[in-house]
Image: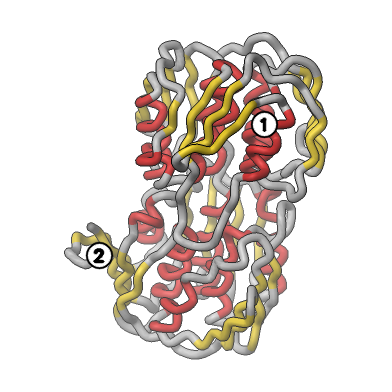
Amino acid sequence: MEKFVITGGKKLKGRVKISGAKNGVLAMMPASILAPGIFRLFNVPNLRDVWTMSRLMNDMGIYSELNDSELFIDSRNIHSFEAPYEHVKKMRASFYVLGPLVARFGKAKVSLPGGCAWGPRPVDLHIKGLQKLGAEITIEGGYVIAKANRLIGSRIHLDIPSVGATGNILMASVLAKGSTIISNAAIEPEITALAKFLVKMGAKVEGIGTNTLEIEGVDELCSTNETVIPDRIEAGTILIAGAITEGNVTIESCNPYHLTSIISKMEEAGCEFDIHEDKITVKLDGPPNPVDITTSVYPGFPTDMQSQWVAFMLKAIGVSKITETIYPDRFKHVPELQRLGAEIEMSENTAIVYGGKQLTGATVMSSDLRGSAALVLSGLIAKGTTEVLRIYHIDRGYESIDKKLRLLGADIVRVQTEDY
């Protein structure tokens, strides 16, 4: 096991490059199931989740190899149509293989997913969508078993604009017979990138970037190459790291358009920005203003930045409210922040943060990916030493976060530990 040891009080300064989007590549990898051939994905982050998906696909007969930031995929020899629990329990994105397997092979057996240790995140929208496309689905022993001679296009309305369901149904529909319309679809940048990737493979998709996707099924697709978009959540996290330490930080290889809601709220908090085509500089002199946020689907404030915003508001002098509307139980980080001296009250799905109090270093434990980031951010401003345990959570979604923070002047080291 490993942990981070952080000595707070350093103002971050300098520049750092943003990696490719975790949620982008984790959708593109299963899309390779749809066509036999050689794929090359560029700007791929070296993450635990990418390796988990690679191991799952390898078990199915799909060879993959990551060299630097280039991922080589050979999908010509698929021999298994099962995604076992041992892989899917580690990462919900593994469920993405369901749609492509049914679309291309007419059968799939995929474990119900696991993932972060907070709140129910049902897959009923995925299943209902595939059923609308004609798949026969049963659930046996914790597995979703899907069968279809060939999927048939349909009109599918999502009750909520789920990213996972949109991606799974989109991948299934590109090989379905006839036309499919997905309404109330998610419009997150990772879904837009997936749709463009499918088009490069030969799919016919209209309405990309809108909440209504129109797909005309084709008989076959071909392999292709693609560059993964920048990770907007990593970008937002590093921007907050710069601001929370009252520093001056530049992020490069990013897409400012994807960060509009985050930048807007940070400006409200008093941050100054210098924004260019693919880089952003943030500067903050003094503590931030207290600013309320409510998470919502893109282009609203992302749920994946909620934990980090709680940490940021601990530095603000005053009271702020952080309301979670996507996953109401996503506050596992709050008790750990309280161990550092944070004053936070919970009221249903809202965290009330009383900021401006000096945090003091302590040992804290990660319980999920984004909550881990909040603990690291808080450690950067805590007095003394903070130890963050179970950092395998943060390694799922941040490529070498400790190295990047050290480049900016943070006092953070990764060490072996016997603590669990």
Mark closer to the observer (1, 2)? 1
Amino acid type, mark 2:
Tyr
Which residue lies at the image location 64% right of the left edge and 36% below the top edge? 167
- Quadrant where the C terminus sits is bottom left
CA neighbours of label 1 inside 10 A, class few (<14), some (14 to 19), many (20+): many
Among the 4 quarters of the image, the one containing residue 355 = bottom right
Question: Compared with residue 45, is residue 385 higher up or lower down, i.e. above or below?
Answer: below
Q: Nearer the viewer, residue 151 or 284?
A: 151
Q: Quadrant of the N terminus?
A: bottom left
Residue that badge 2 annotates:
420
Rendering quarter of residue 165: top right
Residue 143, image x, y percentages: 48, 38
Determine the secondary structure under disc 2: loop
Q: Give me the C-alpha separation between circle 1 and circle 2.
A: 40 Å
Q: Which residue is mark 1?
A: 130
Is residue 226 in sight in this rendering?
no
| 386 horizontally vs 134: left or right | left
What's the residue at 74%, 17% (across, down)? 217
Tell me the number on the disc at residue 141. Answer: none
Where 249 falls versus 136 (above or below)? below
Is 363 rendered above or below residue 370? below
Can you see residue 295? yes
* Count of numbered labels shown in the rendering: 2
In x, y percent, where is residue 358?
Answer: 45, 89
The residue depicted at 68 percent of the width and 77 percent of the height is 291
